[in-house]
Amino acid sequence: MHGITTSGIATLAGTVLFDEKKVEYLRRDDEAFIPMPPWVNSIVATALYGTKAEVREASKLLMDLGRKEGGRYTGDEMAVGDWASRHDRYANPLHGRLKDGTVAPMSWHCEDSSTNWSVIPKVREEWTAIAQKYIDRYGIFDNWGMYCYTSASYKPWGDFLTEIDIGIWEERLDDETWAGWVDFKTEIAKVSLKYGGSISNCHGTTRIGDAELVPEEMGGGWDVMLKIKRVLDPNNIMNPGKQMLDQAYED
Amino acid sequence: MRRFVYKQEYVRPEATRVSDGVIIRLQHVYEVEPELMGKQFRQQTMPTWDTLRIVESRNEHLRWMHEHFADETLVAGLESELELGPGHPSGDAYPAPPNAPAGHPSPILPY
């Protein structure tokens, strides 16, 4: 994947990596993944923008780079489905699986960070272990796998939006399991910070469990943010109580 | 036009297992293994015409999207990988890859 993202091909708009857990999850009921042979463990997908002549030649170069790393063409179904709002796979409430493999209605929660590509293997390893720990302990969570894609906020090859998708059987949430979910989120966010990632990059951190860690990520920038909030909103009428910004008014 | 016979519609076509946890009864229509579905959900008998209606409705949506998104599809596979058409790679495309694992570089840790 790194070879593709650093290829310098100008038509390359983005690259996505689906990890083994994500492929395993999609094999449950996604028509693009069910027929894939057993040796397919992970997927690298790319999006190219440009004229037909540009994209056609660029795709040949990218596929050659993938083949040199042991990759193989897996067909066009994934691309075709993604054109047509494949995002519905995350809204499918039947994707959830319990520890015994049976189906339970779950909803989709994503935890993500902006992560340097070089630490993605470590982040993946630790996030996956955390997920398994909470799945085993509470029985209402499910690991729907990880994917990471170039976010291009700094350099297209350096900065990846790294995400783990968690299914939650919300009907079974109670005080104990909700506290477990909050701890789950906190552990995930702490791994991001440990490896120098940003937890406020994509879906953001405005909820209990990770919002408390934003000052740690921002360092001295947090004090600047408090000062800006107080200058722009002296009466604290904009989202009072949100994101711990009430701290701006404490003195 | 297909003749509608009420009793026939409630006889589900025989299932064929296509992978772990997935079966197929109608061409190109995948279903989650019924054994996995019944524990947390009450199951209902579904007539074949209703399954076909839902599938066709989704396919109509997909066709519309494809027609309005692009008027041509470029496929990235090699000729040998495409001999059965896009989305149906040949046997050459699916053999187990040689043992050529992508080499992960050493992580650059921020501490």
Image (cartoon, coloured by chain):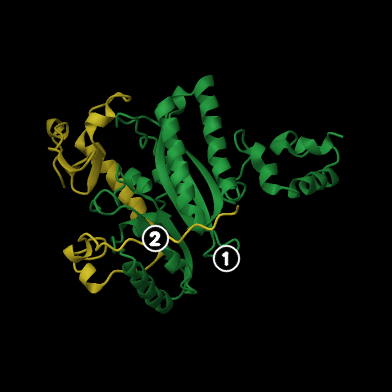
- What element does badge 1 sit on? loop
Whether residue A24 is visible, yes or no, is: yes
Judge depth for marks 1 and 2 and give the one in front: 1
Residue beneath disc 2: A45
> What percent of the width, then of the height, locates residue A56?
37, 75
Sequence-wise first label, 1 or 2: 2
Please name the color used to draw chain A.
Answer: green
* Residue B71 image position (x, y, % from top left): 37, 68
**Quarter occupied by residue B54:** top left
Amino acid type shown at disc 2:
Ala
Q: On the image, numbered disc 1 is attached to which residue?
A: A155
User: What's the residue type where badge 1 is placed?
Assistant: Lys
Residue name at image x 21 percent, y 33 percent: B47
Residue at 16%, 31% in the rendered image: B10
Corner quadrant of residue B97: bottom left
Q: CA distance from mark 1 to mark 2?
A: 18 Å
Figure colour of chain B: yellow
Q: Is residue A32 left or right of residue A184?
A: left
**Residue at image x 40%, y 44%?**
A145
Numbered disc 2: what chain?
A: A
* Residue A47 in the image, given as x and y percentages of width and height: 44, 64
Locate residue A100 relative to residue A180 in the image: left or right: left
Q: Say which quarter of the image contains residue B89.
A: bottom left
Q: Residues within 10 Å of mark 1 (few under 14, many from 20)?
A: few
Q: Position of residue A204 (x, y in %)?
A: 60, 45
